[in-house]
Image (spheres, rainbow, N blue to C red):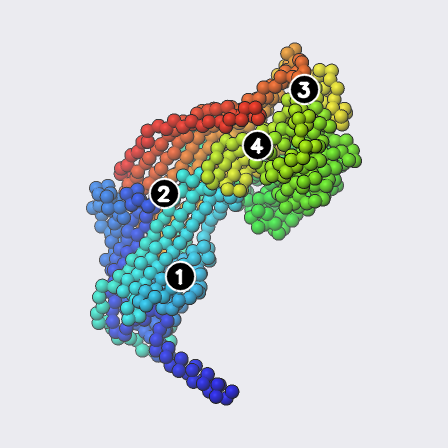
Amino acid sequence: MILLAVLFLCFISSYSASVKGHTTGLSLNNDRLYKLTYSTEVFLDRGKGNLQDSVGYRISSNVDVALLWRSPDGDDNQLIQITMKDVNLENVNQQRGEKSIFKGKKSSQIIRKENLEAMQRPVLLHLIHGKIKEFYSYQNEPAAIENLKRGLASLFQMQLSSGTTNEVDISGDCKVTYQAHQDKVTKIKALDSCKIERAGFTTPHQVLGVTSKATSVTTYKIEDSFVVAVLSEEIRALRLNFLQSIAGKIVSRQKLELKTTEASVRLKPGKQVAAIIKAVDSKYTAIPIVGQVFQSKCKGCPSLSEHWQSIRKHLQPDNLSKAEAVRSFLAFIKHLRTAKKEEILQILKAENKEVLPQLVDAVTSAQTPDSLDAILDFLDFKSTESVILQERFLYACAFASHPDEELLRALISKFKGSFGSNDIRESVMIIIGALVRKLCQNQGCKLKGVIEAKKLILGGLEKAEKKEDIVMYLLALKNARLPEGIPLLLKYTETGEGPISHLAATTLQRYDVPFITDEVKKTMNRIYHQNRKIHEKTVRTTAAAIILKNNPSYMEVKNILLSIGELPKEMNKYMLSIVQDILRFETPASKMVRQVLKEMVAHNYDRFSKSGSSSAYTGYVERTSHSASTYSLDILYSGSGILRRSNLNIFQYIEKTPLHGIQVVIEAQGLEALIAATPDEGEENLDSYAGLSALLFDVQLRPVTFFNGYSDLMSKMLSASSDPMSVVKGLLLLIDHSQELQLQSGLKANMDVQGGLAIDITGAMEFSLWYRESKTRVKNRVSVLITGGITVDSSFVKAGLEIGAETEAGLEFISTVQFSQYPFLVCLQMDKEDVPYRQFETKYERLSTGRGYISRKRKESLIGGCEFPLHQENSDMCKVVFAPQPESSSSGWF
């Protein structure tokens, strides 16, 4: 045992002796000056990898590196001096030729004398075991210039052995992996792991979000413990998930190559590095090696007021159907994000009532503390004269791309105050629910404001006595989808009055599969089969939809199929259409339905030959390998032929992630007296009512009412028509991604994607007793613009890429019913107009002096309109025809 201990000690001492005097990182020879060439270059393109399509620039220089001091206690403790000389600028695209922005310009003219002097001042790097201990430079140098020197200095941080560790360099505190092979070392930096403070935000939803990738690989060729050559490549790529033509890539490269060595000054003696630095130059100070933020000054940029005056004509109500309105809206949001509260308030107070709603959309969508303070100061929720502005503010809050707790707290505070309009009070609570959902999706469920909002919704629903308050809190819960609210929803679904029971059921319908437990499905089965009480058809069919959507069991499916034939006439046809749609569209429940249909008792002619006009149909608007757009329409009639409910849905899928784009539900009840018909079972005492409820991009909006009560109904009857009612109208910011990046070369990059739309959804319900006809009409008009931008800035030269797509589209759904005879005649139409589709690309290079190069491309096409099938008897998919136009392009100086 003693012998083993002695051998172990001998091994440790011999190992220590073998590494003493050797370095674990780069090591410079005493009294030698290393002369190297260095370049950093950046390329911007759309990810196609074609140099001819790229914009960018190259900064090159000579570099002198010398060892100033080495600790007498070990070779791994060194102080080195790095000096850039003979700085030069050039295009990365050599084919630019006469159009080069650098042609005829000296580097000193472009960089400017003070910047060039700062760039060529030496920096000191204190290395211990190959890692940066401190970075020394002069105070008050321009941050952009210091970043370029940080990028060069960071290349000298490395280790000669394989392994994974954390390092701090210009990119931040990052996880790096080294792979050592003889005279070659490869360093792989996990850029996603880097901890660095940079501004940025994104839309968390996968469908509306972006996918970004970042890689960094640095290869060192080593000779005599020092670099002979270094090649570093960093790639940053971004693409929009549902429109992959909105994509861009940054390729940043650094090259360092040893040319020669020559004699240098002798090492400075001493034990403490601080004394050595003071002896070199007392003006040196330790600064972070991590890159610092800088902003380039905008020369000749308009003020906020000037910008608004230049675009307000595009935001007139008559121009909102054009893509130029959305372009102006998005551009103004960017400007608002840099504005102060006083500037914003001044514009709000000076604007007229026609354009003011669009201005409110933009100010709210800016989502900055100053813009929020300005709009809250401007709006008076106690006033009945500014209801439209209050509603536009609330809708913009509902669709906020990255809401924060302050916005939620502001709405909670407003809800506890007084209102001039009860509709606005309801809308505030409904939007509070939407914000709770968004904050929880972004890991904000434990925020104090979110907890307070949850208590407000659940407590309000539990204590509410008035029907209007119950509806308000149910709509808020429909947006928030709180798991804690499911017991309350079950209570209202099973025991509530007809409309409240139906609303509670449709709220449960929005919950994800994991929350639809066996207890929930038991309640839905009791409601559908009416085990305890009689329910309206709308409630029963919603209960069936919940069962069939959430992993139904064999017996649940069998009991639903066996019920067909025992239901009211139109409900029979409706449930049969639901089952057939499940089988045709191959939904998750289709496998279980097919198993049950093998039993003759469930699958026979008597059950599957039920007639009626109610229907359900799902189809594709568009389908690709990674995404799909679907539409569905289900219509339920009463036994007398009057519309009971129509439900139009449009979903967008990225792989398996859905986004509920649009839902428009028209409901009517208590209209049988118009044609002296007998109401269906359970619907004998319903008040006359018709209304429209809309859900837009996963946000439930406040429903609108066509008529409510017999007297209101008769006034509509006598007029024989009803004017369209606006469900939602405004400018919305849906896609909002901003990323500020610190490239390891020292350059600053920005990646931005914005998507907005002008939307106008109207609904109308028309009756004619003379012609015994009813008609419902839902019309959607949208203008959409999506832009993506990438810039790389050095403060004296900037390169950029902008890509975008825009369109204007219309979709109309019309349902006409003639109930002069039975079976009544039904006509369903869903038409899409011709859609112009435009794509554009702009690339540029610009000097801080104003000189620049720009290239533009534009491509247009026309997507032919079509009529979508709405029932199984006409199930051919709508054919979309593209009519491409010639591509146009231009390039030149500016």
Tell which tag, 3 or 4, sits nearer the viewer. 4
Kind of residue indicated by mark 4:
Arg
Asked if labels 4 and 2 touch by Cβ distance under 8 angstroms, the answer is no
Q: Residue at x 46, y 27 (%)?
A: 879
Read off the residue under disc 1. Answer: 169
Read off the residue under disc 2. Answer: 46
Q: Residue at x 25, y 74 (%)?
A: 31
Quarter location, residue 292: bottom left
Kind of residue indicated by mark 2:
Arg
Residue 293: percent from the left, percent from the top?
41, 54
Tell which tag, 2 or 4, sits nearer the viewer. 4
Which quadrant would the C terminus be assigned to in this image? top left
Tell which tag, 1 or 3, sits nearer the viewer. 3
Read off the residue under disc 4. Answer: 584
Lower sequence index among marks 1 and 2? 2
Residue 421: percent from the left, percent from the top?
65, 31
Quarter location, residue 663: top right
Mark 3: which secondary structure?
Answer: loop
Kind of residue indicated by mark 1:
Asp
Mark 2: which secondary structure?
Answer: loop
Is residue 556 visible in this depiction of the protein? yes
